[in-house]
Image: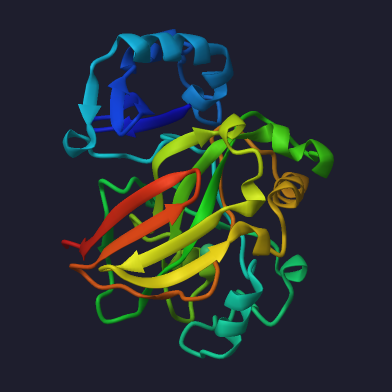
């Protein structure tokens, strides 16, 4: 099943190039009061509501994508986790380019198991329909295309052999970053610098997430290509490792790392990301309005 959030936070099921509005399913979520539990309530209830979501989709009229503005498929993650230096070709390009080599916090000369994971601010999260707003036009802002994965349920110290059972689904992700000397999490947390979309493909539809071809282009020019098999730290290990430091909650997002070919974008550009079996999204880039 492909599940999206669209327009004014409506919920949809994507079938054959159309969206079927299933927003009525939100009436089945728990009626929560302050303090709210951590995590995304729709993702937390997804398995139990899945049959009903399918029935609502059967009855809903198909809406063409041209009338749909895709938001991030997760509304309320408790955290967005980043995986650095996770493709050998990207590690090599970072070592060869001092413009993209962090000078303090990240240490790309260290292997990933010595670097650890990082976090991006939740407030940076947008969907492709919202686009990326370049905050500092005089500095270099780069795209990093990544497979995004969404956690299904709460877990801590998850064994690697059980880790895949904690995946709700997959989405396309852009880990946008301002290059420069500040701490990595600061530079990667600018508003709109965490793009997730256009929908979440539930985990049952992707038997092997470590064999997906992907491609990113800017204005039609291919910049990044690869296959998720080339990840140094595989998805199951990422989940186990992350959960050995902090509890994972339903809706938590992991951006699983980028391959080589990262590069600058500017207002007016259109970034296109495609991962096999997941989908394709176009993300417009504009200037931030102060
Ligand atoms: Mn990244």
Query: Between residues 122 and 12, which one lies in front from this camera angle?
Result: 12
**In the rendered view, does 120 fall on the left or right side of 128?**
right
Residue 177 appears in which quarter of the rendering?
bottom left
Q: Residue furthest front?
A: 16
Q: Position of residue 190 (x, y in %)?
A: 37, 61
Please state if 108 lies on the left or on the right of 42 as rendered.
right
Residue 59 to residue 252: above or below: above
Q: Nearer the viewer, residue 6 or 182?
A: 6
Q: Residue at x 49, y 35 (%)?
A: 201
What residue is drawn where x is 29% and y is 54%?
Answer: 282
Q: Which of 204 and 158 is in front in this view?
A: 204
Instruction: Identify the residue shown where x is 63% and y is 46%.
Output: 209
Look at the image and name its color scheme: rainbow
Residue 31, horizontal then vertical, whole percent: 44, 10
**213 or 177, which lies in front?**
213
Quadrant where the C terminus lies?
bottom left
Quarter of the view holding residue 155? top right
Q: Is residue 105 visible?
A: no
Is 16 situated above or below 260? above
Residue 278 visible (yes or no):
yes
């Amino acid at each position: 099943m492909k599940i999206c959030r669209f327009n004014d936070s409506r919920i949809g099921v994507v079938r054959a190039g159309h969206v079927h509005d299933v927003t009525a399913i939100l009436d089945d979520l728990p009626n929560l009061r302050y303090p709210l539990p951590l995590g995304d309530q729709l993702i937390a209830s997804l398995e139990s509501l899945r049959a009903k979501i399918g029935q609502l989709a059967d009855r809903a009229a198909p809406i063409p994508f041209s009338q749909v503005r895709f938001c991030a498929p997760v509304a309320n993650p408790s955290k967005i986790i980043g995986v650095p230096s996770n493709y050998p070709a990207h590690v090599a390009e970072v070592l060869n380019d001092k413009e993209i080599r962090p000078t303090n916090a990240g240490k790309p000369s260290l292997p990933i198991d010595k670097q650890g994971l990082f976090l991006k601010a939740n407030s940076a999260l947008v969907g492709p329909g919202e686009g990326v707003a370049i905050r500092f036009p005089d500095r270099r802002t780069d795209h990093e295309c990544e497979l995004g994965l969404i956690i299904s349920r709460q877990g801590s110290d998850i064994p690697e052999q059980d880790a895949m059972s904690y995946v709700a689904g997959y989405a396309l992700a852009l880990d946008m970053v301002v290059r420069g000397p500040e701490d990595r999490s600061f530079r990667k947390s600018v508003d709109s610098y965490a793009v997730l979309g256009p929908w979440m493909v539930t985990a049952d539809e992707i038997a092997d997430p470590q064999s997906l071809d992907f491609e990113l282009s800017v204005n039609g020019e291919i910049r990044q290509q690869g296959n998720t098999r080339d990840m140094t730290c595989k998805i199951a290990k990422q989940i186990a490792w992350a959960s050995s430091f902090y509890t994972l909650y339903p809706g938590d997002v992991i951006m699983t790392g980028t391959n080589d070919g990262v590069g600058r974008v500017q207002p007016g550009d259109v970034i296109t990301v495609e991962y096999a079996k997941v989908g394709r999204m176009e993300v417009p880039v504009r200037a931030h309005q102060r």
